[in-house]
Amino acid sequence: MPEGDTIFRAAQTLHRALAGGVVTRFESVYPKVMRVADDRPIVGRTIHAVASRGKHVLITLSSGLTLHTHMRMNGSWHIYRPGERWQRSARDMRVLVATDRFVAVGFNVPVVELLSDAELARHDELRELGPDLLDPAFDAAAAIQRLRDRATDAIGDALLNQRVMSGIGNVFKSEILFVARVEPFRAVRSLTDNEIARIISTAKDLLRAAVLPASKTLSPAFGRRTTRSLDPEQKLWVYARGGKPCRKCGTPIEARKTGIDARLTYWCPQCQP
Ligand SMILES: [Zn+2]
């Protein structure tokens, strides 16, 4: 499942390739999208910007239209040069936006919508998004309030709730709580103000570190690493490390399936009492 950092980087890459260009070709397999495009042609519009909001990607076009996509579990965007062979089957194409320089292809993207400015402003899912951890204007106080509003939720579940704050997926959930030394199943109301503040600042730091250009992270590539280790085998503290020794104390890492989609939560019972 792509997390906020992955979507943020995808949006940045799309922005570099597409922004300022004029759409020369637009396709989607979704009839509803093509109906809008029939009424309000996309070809000929200038691409103003590509940006992420939480796990959503918004491609802003001239004359008040925005292409909204969400990757959910399996979607991805690829960028090709015109005529270049795709790395995925054309059957998986859901949406395509081309300029004279690049072809951006959304594969298995389940949510594709063309929205007017008014529709964008009243879009339920976008409107309800909590503060975006990767937004430079991230509002920590608002995030703390939204977290406190989920008093009876387990903190691990609350972090995944995009209405509380947006950008955290399953990998970061476990990593943030390890670094903040908080057990994932504690109810939000049991957390002290200090713990809440530590969780939010850790979340912000880890997600932002994951989107820094390689030259600023000492790592050979972009990447999701939370340990600061340069060893690719030691990128994460607890995620996917069930049964292995904790990198800090040696205690075996625990793993448990939780939530409606039974995703695994990882934690160290010693470091996260
Ligand atoms: Zn430990």
Image (cartoon, helix red, strand yellow):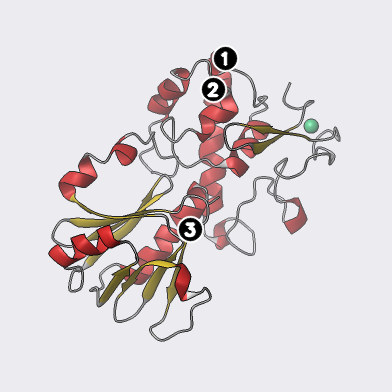
Tell me, yes or no, whether the two marked residues, 2 and 1, touch with CB atoms within 8 Å. Answer: yes
- Residue 251 vs 126, above or below: the answer is above
Q: Residue at x 46, y 72 (%)?
A: 91
Nearest to N terminus: mark 2 or mark 3: 3
Q: Where is residue 258 in the image (x, y as percent from the top left)?
A: 64, 31
Question: Nearest the camera: 115 or 19?
Answer: 115
Q: Nearer the viewer, mark 2 or mark 3?
A: 3
Q: Can residue 40 be seen?
A: no
Nearest to N terminus: mark 3 or mark 1: 3
Q: Which residue is drawn at 48% across and 47% down?
A: 4
- Residue 69 vs 147, above or below: the answer is below
Q: Which amino acid does label 1 sit on?
A: Thr
Tell me the element at label 1.
loop
Tell me the element at label 2.
helix
Q: Residue placed farthest to the front in the image? A: 31
Question: Nearest the camera: 29 or 12?
Answer: 29
Question: Nearest the camera: 34 or 13?
Answer: 34
Task: Choose top left, top right, bottom left or bottom right for residue 143.
Answer: top left
Disc 3: CA contacts within 10 A as few (<14), some (14-19) or many (>=20): some
- Residue 37 vs 211, above or below: the answer is below
Q: What residue type is labelled 3?
A: Gly
